[in-house]
Image (cartoon, grey):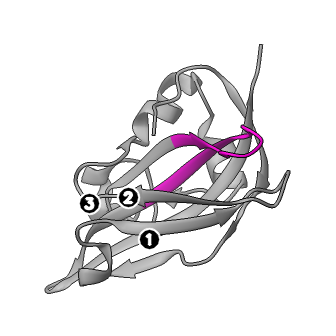
Amino acid sequence: MYSISKKIKIGKKALLKKDRFINDDAIPAAIVQFTCSECNHENTVEISPYQSGFPILQIYNEGKVLSKSDLLGNQMTTETSQRMQHYGELTVNDLPTLYFGTHCISCNTNYICVFSYGEKQPSLEILNISGIWEYQEVE
C-alpha cells in the first residue's frame, strides 16, 4: 500500500469478490480479493480500519493527482451530503474516505483502491470499497 503523488489516468475497474464489510467482518482487517483486468490474476489486499489508506483529499486537492470530476465521473466517490461536509467534499457513503495504491503481484499493473470506513449508525461500522481501478501515471 502506498500513496500516489503523480498525476494519473484511470483505466478499467477490477472485479472485486466482496466490496462491503460490516462490523466484525472488518476486524482486525478486511481481506479484499480483486482480479487483475490485464492478466486475470487474483490479488489480495488487507484493509485495516483506522490504519490503512490515505485521505482522499490528497488525490483531488488542487487536482494534483486526479480532479474532482475524474473521481465523480468514474464513480469512485460521490458529493458529500450537507450534513456530513466535515468529512470533505467527496466521500463514499458519506463516511471518512481513503485511498491507496497497490499493484498486481503477477503483471505489476498499478491499481488505486477507494474506500470508506466508519459508523453509519449506532453499532453499525461499515467498510465500503467503492472500487479498485487500474491506473497509469501521466507524464
Give the residue number, with chain letter if any, for mark 2: 47
Give the amino acid type for the residue marked by disc 2 in the picture. Ile
Residue at point 71%, 54% (across, down): 74
Q: Is residue 14 above or below residue 64?
A: below
**Mark 3 / mark 1, whichever is N-terminal:** 3
Residue 102 on the magenta span: yes
Q: What element carries label 3?
A: loop
Hey, which residue is sitting farthest left in the picture? 122
Q: Is residue 92 visible?
A: yes
Disc 3 to disc 1, how far (Cα)? Answer: 11 Å
Q: How many labels does the image show?
A: 3
Residue at point 62%, 47% (across, down): 71
Q: Where is residue 113 in the image (x, y as percent from the top left)?
A: 55, 51
Callout 2: 10 Å neighbours few (<14), some, many (20+)?
Answer: many
**Mark 1 / mark 2, whichever is N-terminal:** 2
Disc 1 to disc 2, how far (Cα)? Answer: 11 Å
Residue at point 77%, 13% (across, down): 139
Mark 1 vs 2: CB contact within 8 A:
no
Mark 2 vs 3: CB contact within 8 A:
yes
Query: Residue 83: which quarter of the image?
Result: bottom left
- Which residues are the magenta region? 101-115
Q: What element carries label 2?
A: strand
- Number of the front mark, 3 or 1: 3
Residue at point 43%, 68% (across, down): 31
Q: In this view, does 104 lie to the left or right of 23?
A: right
Give the residue number, with chain letter if any, for mark 1: 128
Q: Can residue 93 be seen in this view?
A: no
